[in-house]
Amino acid sequence: MTKRFIILFSLILLLYSCSSQDKKAIETVTQLQEKVTKMQHQYNSVDYLAVKVAQKEYNESMTLIKKYYFKDTIDKEFMSALDIYRGVKTGTKGIGKKKEALESNLLLVENQLINLKEDLNNVSIQGKTVEEALNTEIKNISRLENALNFYLKNIENILFAHDSVALYIRNKTRTF
């Protein structure tokens, strides 16, 4: 009788400890999903129309400057503004193909977290595998967050450069 009680108690303890770890893992996955959702909102909040307008106006202004501006003219204010305005071109290099990659990676990470949560709920993975899977997802989300921040910073630089000097540059190019 005591052997049965010890075995039963051990099984209950084992099941309880496993379910406790699984609950923590599921909570961690839920937190990661919330983080990815916030990242998707940040990504979706970008005003791409404003970025396209900035790029178009930059290209038009630079075409006029290359065609009509004489470099022997000394205009420090214009040159300073032009240096700031070149931030549109610099920022554009940083966002090119990254937009599509970010979009697909956000979707991929979201799906991986859904699958991981299902596996945890179905007890398909246990023990060290759970810890390894969580660590992998945490690293993936960290890398994705860094890439998203870089992307958003480039968008911010484009819009700042455009908002701060585009009107001045455009008016100046009309006087050449």
Image (cartoon, grey):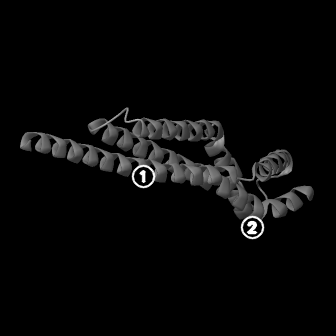
Residue 33 appears left or right of 134: right
- The residue drawn where x is 35% and y is 45% is 22
Residue denoted by label 1 = 27
Pick whichever, 28 or 52, lies toward us: 28
**Residue projecting furthest to the right:** 175
- Outermost residue, top side: 124
Residue extending furthest toward the left: 2
Rendered location of residue 130, percent (x, y):
33, 39
Task: Please name the residue shown 73% across and 62% down the image.
Answer: 81
Q: Is residue 11 left or right of residue 172?
A: left
Element type where label 2 sits in the image: helix
Q: Label 1 is placed on what type of residue?
A: Glu
Q: Which residue is mark 2?
A: 77
Task: Between residue 117 and residue 133, name the one nearer to us.
Answer: 117
| Residue 34 visible (yes or no) | yes
* Residue density around tag 1, few if under 14, some if 14–19, many if 20 or more, within 10 Å: few
